[in-house]
Image (cartoon, rainbow, N blue to C red):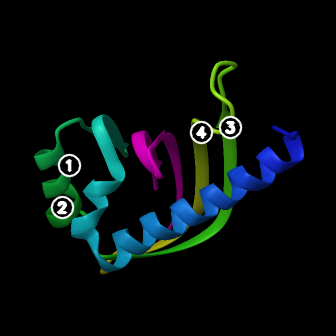
Amino acid sequence: MDPALKEQMSYQIAESFTKSYYGAMDKCRQKVIDFYMDGFMIDWNEEYFRERETAQDFLLHKTPESEHEITSIMPVVKTTEKVKGITSMSVNAMGNVHYKGLGVKVFYQDFHLVKMGNDWKIYSTILRD
């Protein structure tokens, strides 16, 4: 694949993914767990989750309502010689998050994504705010 095309595609994937993910976090949080593949790992400010029910409970009941403003997205594509095209990638997202009752914080989130059919699923993510 042409490197310029790969870069353009990876940015489009990263932009679409982060828009969907943070849209769900801000407006439809019960759907966020659907972004994660089986066997995922979440590191949320050094609180770790690997089980769907525990992660869902944390996201729904232990994190305040939020509104994200993304200021920077950086995709990092990973490919293998055996598979043509983009099969996995990292996406680094930065911006500001307004937590209800807590004000605005700067955040950084790193996603490791795997292509599963037509969808991109989170294998692991690290969030710091």
Q: CA distance from mark 1 to mark 3?
A: 31 Å
> What's the amino acid at mark 1?
Ala
Counting labels gives 4
Quadrant assignment, res 96 = bottom right
Question: What secondary structure is found at the residue carrying circle 4?
Answer: strand
Q: CA distance from mark 4 to mark 2?
A: 29 Å
Earlier sequence position, callout 2 versus callout 3: 2
Residue 109 in picture, x, y percent from top left = 51, 51
> What's the amino acid at mark 3?
Gly
Q: Looking at the image, is mark 1 or mark 2 nearer the viewer?
A: 1
Question: What secondary structure is found at the residue carrying circle 2?
Answer: helix
Q: Which residue is mark 2?
A: 62
- CA neighbours of label 1 inside 10 A, class few (<14), some (14 to 19), many (20+): some
Rendered position, 3 above or below 99: above
Question: What secondary structure is found at the residue carrying circle 3?
Answer: loop
Q: CA distance from mark 1 to mark 2?
A: 10 Å
Q: Which residue is mark 1?
A: 55
**Magenta includes 25?**
no
Q: CA distance from mark 3 to mark 4?
A: 11 Å
Residue 98 in picture, x, y percent from top left = 44, 76
Earlier sequence position, callout 4 versus callout 1: 1
Q: Which residue is mark 4?
A: 89
- CA neighbours of label 4 inside 10 A, class few (<14), some (14 to 19), many (20+): many
Q: Which residue is mark 3?
A: 85
Residue 111 or residue 45, whichever sits in front: 111
Q: Is residue 8 left or right of residue 107?
A: right
Q: Looking at the image, is mark 4 or mark 2 nearer the viewer?
A: 4
Q: Is residue 46 visible?
A: no
| Residue ID at (18%, 65%) | 60
